[in-house]
Image (cartoon, rainbow, N blue to C red):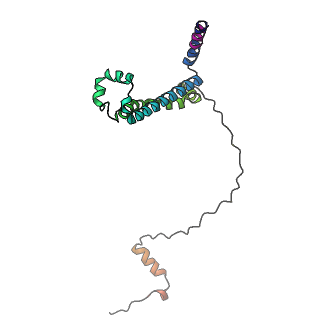
Amino acid sequence: MSEQLIPWAAWAGLVLLAILCLPIGGCQRFVLSVSVWVLRLALLAVLAGGAYLYFRPGEVPDRVSNVLNDFPGLLSVLPDRAAPYFGLCLACLIVAPLIPVLAALDVTRALAGRRLNRLCAIADGRPQVVAVESAPRTVVETAPPIAPPVVEATPVMRPIGRRTASTAFASAPRSHIPVAPVGH
């Protein structure tokens, strides 16, 4: 029975993967969301495994030891396998380079979908149709405008020449001009 279902499952998987490969905004966002969550959970599992190996350093899986034996340069950077912090250091070395990949996937996931279509339209120079949601309008009563304060003009002092001064003294009534005593 399972031999009859394998070809159908293979064809269904092929069609599904072909659809997910198409440049459809919704499909791209779905693929990115799934890959972000898979990577995030895998990194958290690696960190949890490193924390577990801190408390039980003798339980390093054989597969991990076999992979580490293939990379002697990596073993020279890591502490001894019997040390309790070996698992923590190994987990940090695995997770640290993948954090920027996770951040890049998060950003691309945020841009995928409608935003991606809008950005492509801007890049191609196509006109955009923007749907604007109208917010309920509220009536705001405004107070009458306040008149600006009246500023009095400050007299401008101009330099006075000799002729102007002599004319001012000559036209002034004599009773107001103080006279200096003569002879002192």
- In this orientation, which residue lies closer to the viewer: 140 or 36? 36
Q: Position of residue 90 (x, y in %)?
A: 36, 31
- In this orientation, which residue lies closer to the viewer: 65 or 178? 65
Q: Which residue is pictured at 30% across the width and 27% down the height?
A: 75
Q: Position of residue 50 (x, y in %)?
A: 40, 33
Query: In this rendering, is residue 8 above or below 86?
Result: above
Quadrant containing the C terminus is bottom left
- In this orientation, which residue lies closer to the viewer: 159 or 7? 7
Quadrant containing the N terminus is top right
Residue 8 picture quarter = top right
Q: Which residue is pictured at 42% across the width and 78% down the height?
A: 166
Q: Which residues are magenta?
A: 7-13
Query: In this rendering, is residue 169 above or below 29?
Result: below
Residue 17 picture quarter = top right
Query: In this rendering, is residue 161 above or below 73?
Result: below
Q: Position of residue 16 (x, y in %)?
A: 58, 16
- In this orientation, which residue lies closer to the viewer: 12 or 183? 12
Q: Position of residue 41 (x, y in %)?
A: 49, 30
Residue 149 picture quarter = bottom right
Q: Which residue is pictured at 40% across the width and 72% down the height?
A: 161
